[in-house]
Structures are given as structure tokens and as C-alpha cells.
Image (spheres, helix red, strand yellow):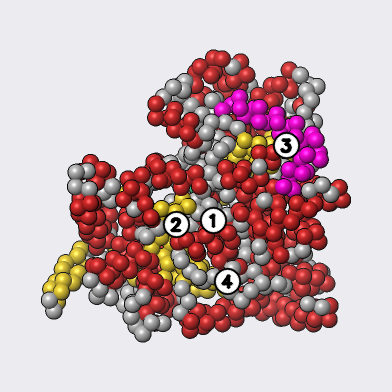
Amino acid sequence: MNSSEKQTKKEAFKADYINKIEEVSGNCLEESSVLKQYQALAELVMDEITTQWAKINTQYNKHQTKQVYFFSIEFLIGRLLKSYINNIDMDEVVTESLEELGLDYAAIQEQESDPGLGNGGLGRLMACYLDSSAAMGMPANGNGIRYKYGLFEQRIINGEQVEVADNWLKNGYPFEIRKPDKSVIVKYYGSIHSENINGSLTFIHEDYEPIMAVPYDIPIKGYHNETVNSLRLWSAEPIDGFDLPTFNQGQFLYAIRQKSEAESISQILYPNDSGFDGKLLRLKQEYFFVCAGLKRIVSHYKRNNSNSVDGFGEKICIHINDTHPAMCGPELMRILMDEEGLGWNDAWKMTVSALSFTNHTVLPEALEKWPINMMNKLLPRIYMIIEEINRRFIEELDACYPNNIERNHSLSIIKDGQVHMASLSIVTSHSINGVASLHSKILREETFNGFYQVFPERFHSVTNGVSPRRFLMRSNPKLKDLLNESIGIEWEKNLFQLKKLSNYINDPVFYEKFDAIKLANKFYLADYITKHIDISVDPNSIFDIQVKRIHEYKRQLLNALHILYLYNRLKENPNLEMAPRTFIFAGKAAPGYYFAKDIIKLINAIAYMVNNDKTVQDKMKVVFLANFNVSLAEIIYPSANVSEQISTAGKEASGTSNMKFMMNGAITLGTMDGANIEISEAVGPTNIVTFGLTSDEVFHYQKYGGYHSVDVFEQDPRIQKVMHQLVDGTLGFGLNFQSIYDSLILYNDPYFVLKDFNAYSDAQNRIDQLFRNNKTWTKMSISNIAQSGMFSSDRSIADYQREIWEIK
Ligand code: Z16
């Protein structure tokens, strides 16, 4: 775009924008509120995108392009306005135009709500995958739930987590299109009876409770290309609501009750990250978006295929994100048999060919198992089909492995009164994959070893990735500019091109610019911290950051205990030589996970003590930032020096914040777990600090015993002191962290916190030494960015495309 083209575009934009403001607010520009300025800008951008959307949809239909559909109970998409503007290449025009109009672009963007339709890694991964698919011009769409309330807003009051409802729709949402004409009826409860119609057995669902599923579509715009894909989120509504023809008092109350019962299905997101709750409402949610989504996909397919489902299994990929959408298998069988008239075998071939499944955790408490009675009552036809799938599967097993009754029972989808959703997913899919190479290996050798023996060819591995558009270009624009002026712009389309940075690995001029950007980003976060929690931190200190859901296996506790130990060292020796540190935490605890809430309380108590102690002021600070979400994450990653990835080895399936930090030049301080292992291989041992038990060692202790945390306690005076401080009032009058003490000593430290304490403390010393040599640190930091290409979600999507969906 040359300067006169830009001028023309700016003039056109300004004229359109002024009109739009008048249209949405009834005020002229000068009298409009920031909210209306935002809404007008959002609508203008949406107008442009929907035009492109209509075009590409026509093309997709005409060419019958192979389509992927991600079924996921979470999509954590983050704010969209700025990303849309970047992706349609309008950022310069908008930035300059708004400035010329005297408007505050940053404040306008702040008006957008951040849809919290996910808990953490799993939901954000889906958003990155949609972003990458669109960027690569690949037709892939999302299918999920339009929760009225997203993940709760977290406040910290008196050092404790308090949950507030997240009313993200309160001002409306400009990026969705409601499509009532594409509504679907979802049927719950009732009974099934079979009838012999013209010689074939037909199943009829009677006395069911109908719920209306209404879709809202959000466009997913590709970066600098023509692609616009769709994220379809379903909202639950009553059928006919208040439109009862005549009603007396009783019917009126009945109608209201129906309405709120129906709406409850898409009312809230369950706030557990990697934990299975087992609530009936959750089961309703799972069937809700599976049933509605598949119904629309099949009818859309038929419309483009002479009203036939022929070829469905080759043209459609239904990707199951964890087991929450596992009923895709039986539901697709139901549609193909009961509605399309196919026989079992044809329907089965089509289903297995369409379905693929990604597992995201090996934590036993997260594996979904639904009571037979619950499922049979709520979803009688689905349960029947699951029984039949299982019956045939076991029959085949018995034929292949006749003398292995015990193993064959262990693989049964239905056993011990429960339906095992992971088993159901594996049996109904042609592919199952883990999300990092260690994780996939654990799936093959431990978690799903029995299935691996039966279906070795179904097992794959695709290491997770993150969107460089969101977590580098958008969140760290200064770094983006430096990269562009140094190595050209090819990296924007192919992140492996960041390898070209190795040309600058010893360039002092580049170092200076690079360090200045990191420092500016740290100033920005420091400012945010002062504004929000009134703590002043030193931007020249090491920003040592752990941001993720609070969970015992992620071991925020290890980090916290080490901070307490460092504080003790400083109290003993105020002249201790060390680079000043700012320890930063953020993350939500599931509301019912009391131990995780105690960890938040502990971190805040330590922070209060440290930050108010004058003797350690210049050496350390501790910060807990409330309400970690995508918007806050975008501010945090670019400012980090140290990325804390310290899960108990074998427990973190992949991790994705490790990749977001790396892309922004932070050094990983981590265990050999999840994708940390691949990061370590990519950067080499000199550019990462690893420590602690390996997953083999952890498994060995868990299987054969031999770890006694009390022995570690008794042999290590540093640990003794820290442990006593948890319960002796050091951390504040009346504050007693007995639950944490007991877990570590009485219950033998199930996550090996004390076992890894010494190794972690050594690793922290290495970090200190490395940081104090500024050149070394900068070199490490640049090397991390240079090697981050493989952690782009573009690479992950290319892997899925090639190995799992088999799209050319
Ligand atoms: C989740 O975020 C993850 C797993 C899971 O079973 C449920 C939820 Cl909500 C996470 C994993 O813990 C993490 O290691 C992984 O990187 C992420 O999913 C994406 O795969």
C-alpha cells in the first residue's frame, strides 16, 4: 500500500466510521461515549468480514472442500477486534485515522469484553487452532457452547480468591450472528420403542423433553488472506417459551419453569480444569452441542451432495477435543441409522472414518466416567447405541484374543456401572493422539496400553502449538517490528524462519535494541501492577513468572516454598549477592478446590510479608495478579525473563504457556515434563534450565514406593524452617497453613514438592548466575525465540492435516 492509497483508505474509513457512530449511538462523534466508539468500530470491521465470509462460503460449497469440525466444550478466544483489524491488514489505517479523529484506540479496545468460554490450556488451544487453520487457508470450524456466563472473574480480597459472575454479554457482542433459522431440537429423557416398518427395525423416541438449540456464528478471519471460517456456539432456549395459546396460572408457572430449565443448559461453564465433576447438567451440555452440531453438519453436507450422506466419512472430519464430545460417535451412528436409514455396518464405517480424538490429560481424576443409570435415563437411544458398540467391540476382541477375558473386560466401554468416555472415544475414532511426545508415550505405554495393543495404528502424537499472531505479533508489537527490520517478514507466514535470528546471536547493536524492548515491556507490566495492586516493582529485576491454573500437580507450592526460603536467606544475610527478583503469579483455582485456594492464600501471605519488609525491599518482591485471562496473558508473556514450568514430571500433558513465554524470549525453568522436553531439545541444554525427577522416576516411586517425604524434611534444615513457618504465625497473625503442611508431611507429598526442592533451589541459583551475565542471558533469550518456530500452532495444524485428517 503506497501513501496515496493509504490516504484514500483513511478518508474512506473515517467517513464510514463517523456514520457508524451516529448509527449506533444517535450521537455525533464528539458526543459519543467510548463504548459506542468501540461498538461502531466493531460493527464496521464486522461489515467487512461478513462480506468476505459470504464469498468464501460460496466457494467452499461449490468445491465441496473437505471440512474439519473441532468439537470442544471450551473455546477461549480472547478479544477479537484488534485481531480482526490486523488480519484484514487495516491496523495502520485504523490507528492513524483514530488518532487524527482525536480518539483513544487503546481505550476503545478496552471496551471489548474478553469471552472466558474456557478454563485454560484446552480451550485456548482450540482458539489457537482455529486461528492457525484460517491463517493457513484451511477449512476448519469450531462447534461448542455459547455460555451466558464464562469462567468466573477472580478477585483477591484479603489475600483470598473470591468469585464473581462473568457477565460478558451485558453490552451485547458484536462479532456473533444469531441464526434462529438453523435451530435444532435436542431431545432428552423419554423412552424408545422399536417398530417393524416395511421389514426394518425403526426406533422411535417418545415422551422426550425437547430443548431448542440456537446457533450463533463467529467469523474466524485468516491472517492476510481470503479465508473466513466459522465458530458455531449453541445457545439453549425453551420451545415456544411464553407462546402458550391460553394459560391459566398453573400453565404460566410451568412455562416459566420450562424456560429457565431449558436455558440452564448453556448458562454456565463448569470451572474445573482437568477435573471430572459428574453433574447431570454437564452431561446435558455434552449431548447438547454434540447433537445440535452434528445435525447441522449432516444436513449441510447433504445439501451439497444431492441429498445423500454418501462420502461423508471421506469429506468430513469430526475432531473430538478431549472426551467431553465423546457422544459424537453414538450420535452420528444414531443420525446415520435412525434418520438416514443406513445399516449398522455402513454407518459404523462412516463414523470411524470421520472421527478423530485428542486426549489432554492422564490425571485419573479427570477421566470421564458416567453412571449407566444417568446416561440411560437422560439419553436412552444414545445409551442403547453405546451398548451395541460395546457388544460388537467385545465380540471382536473375544474372537481375536479368545483367552484374554480379563484384558478384554478392562477394555470394555461399559463396566463397573459406568460408561468410560475415553474408551468410547478410542473405539469410535480412527485416530487418537496425545499433545506432546512424552504424553503420547504415556498414553501408549500406560493409560491406554490395552487399546494400543489392539489398535497400534490408531495412536499418534501431535505436539501442541500456540498462535504467533496472538502471542507474538499482537501482544509484543515492538518485538514484531524489530524482527521485521532484522530478518524480513517471511517469519510472519512461517515461524521456522525465526531461525534467521542466529545471524544476530553475537550482534551488539541487535542486543541493545532487543534488551530495550524487553525492558519497555517490563515497564508496561510494572505499571499495570502499580495500578491494580499498588505494589511497585523494579523493571530491572528478574521477572520470574508462573501463570496458569492453580493445581497441585503444577506445583505453585514449590515456587512459593522456595520464595520463603530465599526470604529466610536474605534475612540471615542482607548482603547476599543476587540479582533482584520479582516473582509474579496469576491463575484461578476451581471454586470447589479448597487446597488450590489455600495455595493462593499462601502466595498472598508470603507476598504481604515480603513486600512490607524494608530489609529485603531492593532484592525481592512477590506479586499475585488477579483474574488471569487471555487479555492479561498478552501483557504478561512479553515482559517475562523466567518461565516457570515446574509440574511433577509425567503430569502436565503438554503445557502451552511454556511456548508463549519462549516465543517472547523468556528462559524456561522447568522439569522434564510435557512439551518442556521438546523445548529443551529445540534450544539445547545451554539455553534452558531443567531440574528434578524424571517421569520414569516419578512412576517408579508411585508404583513401588520408596519415597518418604518426612526423611527429606528431617535431613534438610532449610525445609524444616519453611515448613514451620507455614504453621507458626510467621505469615500473619492467625494464618495457619496446616492443610499444606499435612499434605507435604502427613500424606507423603504426593506431587514430590519436597523431593524436588533441593534441585529446584540449585536451578534457581543457576538462573541467578546466568542473569547476572547480561550478554549470556540475552543470547539465551534470542536463541529461544529463534527456535520457537516448531511451537507455532501452524505447525501443529499442518501435522494434524497430514497425519490425522489426511487433507492434501
Ligand atoms: C485442560 O486445560 C487440559 C487438560 C484437560 O484434561 C482439561 C483441561 Cl480444561 C490442558 C492440559 O493440562 C495441558 O497440559 C495442555 O497443554 C492443554 O490442556 C492443551 O492440550
Q: Amino acid at mark 3?
A: Thr
Residue 623 or 415: which is nearer the viewer?
415
Question: Residue 137 has which mark?
Answer: 4
Q: Secondary structure at mark 4?
A: loop
Q: Amino acid at mark 2?
A: Asn
Q: Is residue 748 left or right of residue 419?
A: right
Q: Residue at x 54, y 25 (%)?
A: 755
Q: Position of residue 553 (x, y in %)?
A: 51, 37
Q: Position of residue 598 (x, y in %)?
A: 53, 33
Q: Secondary structure at mark 3?
A: strand
Alpha carbons under labels 4 and 3: distance apart: 42 Å
The answer as to whether callout 1 falls within 8 Å of ligand 1 is yes
Q: Is residue 789 left or right of residue 74?
A: right
Q: Is residue 206 above or below residue 268?
A: below
Quadrant of residue 297 within the rendered picture:
bottom left
Please name the residue that numbered disc 3 is placed on.
Answer: 582
Alpha carbons under labels 2 and 4: distance apart: 21 Å
Q: Is residue 219 something that shows in the picture?
A: no
Q: Looking at the image, tell me whether mark 2 or mark 4 is earlier in sequence order.
A: 4
Q: Position of residue 743 (x, y in %)?
A: 48, 26
Q: Residue at x 60, y 81 (%)?
A: 51
The magenta span reads 756-783
Please name the residue that numbered disc 2 is placed on.
Answer: 321
- In this rendering, which labeled residue sits more in front, label 1 or label 4? 4
Q: Looking at the image, tell me whether mark 1 or mark 3 is earlier in sequence order.
A: 1
Alpha carbons under labels 1 and 2: distance apart: 10 Å
Alpha carbons under labels 1 and 4: distance apart: 18 Å
The answer as to whether callout 2 falls within 8 Å of ligand 1 is no
Alpha carbons under labels 1 and 3: distance apart: 28 Å
Q: Tell me if residue 10 is in the magenta stretch.
A: no
